[in-house]
Amino acid sequence: MMSCLEAALEAMDRDDFDAVVRIVEEKELTQLLHAITEFSNQRYESLISLVRPLAEQAHTVSQYLVGDMYREARDIAQARRWYRGAALKGHTEAQYHLGASYYSGTGGTPVKEIQGLAWISVADARGHEEAVEMKAALALLASRLSEAEKWRAEELTKRYWNDYVLPFGVAE
């Protein structure tokens, strides 16, 4: 049987916010309400422990949420891990945040500009607003790359395009 949290997350996956409201109204969502309270109080470790079991079962939105919580808790290495799981399954927000973390190397994690460029390009193609705004920074980065790095970036972007844009759709 599906938990209330699982049902709410699946409804969120479908962008069916009416269903989320119905679930909240019809079910006792102690766990979900507790999770929201923990997040609003910035007690990320406690919230991660509530959502992580779903993320470990490869639930896309949960993987993104765990990544986001680790980012908020300033554990960028863990954030990347969870963002990557969701990004590989087409979660646009995770694709953007994964790319941004590679591009900037925040939190003491290594800068991987080419991977950042590729993931942000994927998020851009999928219509992510912040990725669209980063186009100027991406153009500057591309202008600084050596020919070998440009080739690698183009090849990686093509691969990501085929694997993570085409199967999930391009923004109009």
Image (cartoon, helix red, strand yellow):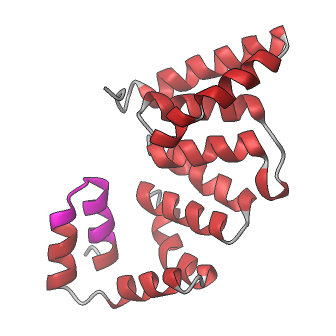
Task: Quarter of the image for the N terminus: give it.
Answer: bottom left
Task: Left or right? Give the position of 10 relative to 133.
Answer: left
Quarter location, residue 69: bottom right
Quarter location, residue 108: bottom right
Task: Left or right? Give the position of 137 relative to 110.
Answer: left
Where residue 139 appears, x then y in whole percent?
67, 21
Residue located at (73% from left, 23% from top):
140
Where residue 83 appears, x then y in whole percent?
58, 52
The residue closer to the viewer here, 31 or 107, is 107
Residue 2 is covered by the magenta coloring: no
Task: Quarter of the image for the C terminus: give it.
Answer: top left
Task: Left or right? Give the position of 8 relative to 163.
Answer: left
- The correct choice, above or below, for 133 with respect to 6 in the image is above
Q: Which residues are magenta?
A: 6-18
Quarter location, residue 111: top right
- The correct choice, above or below, for 85 with respect to 20 in the image is above
Residue located at (58% from left, 61% from top):
67
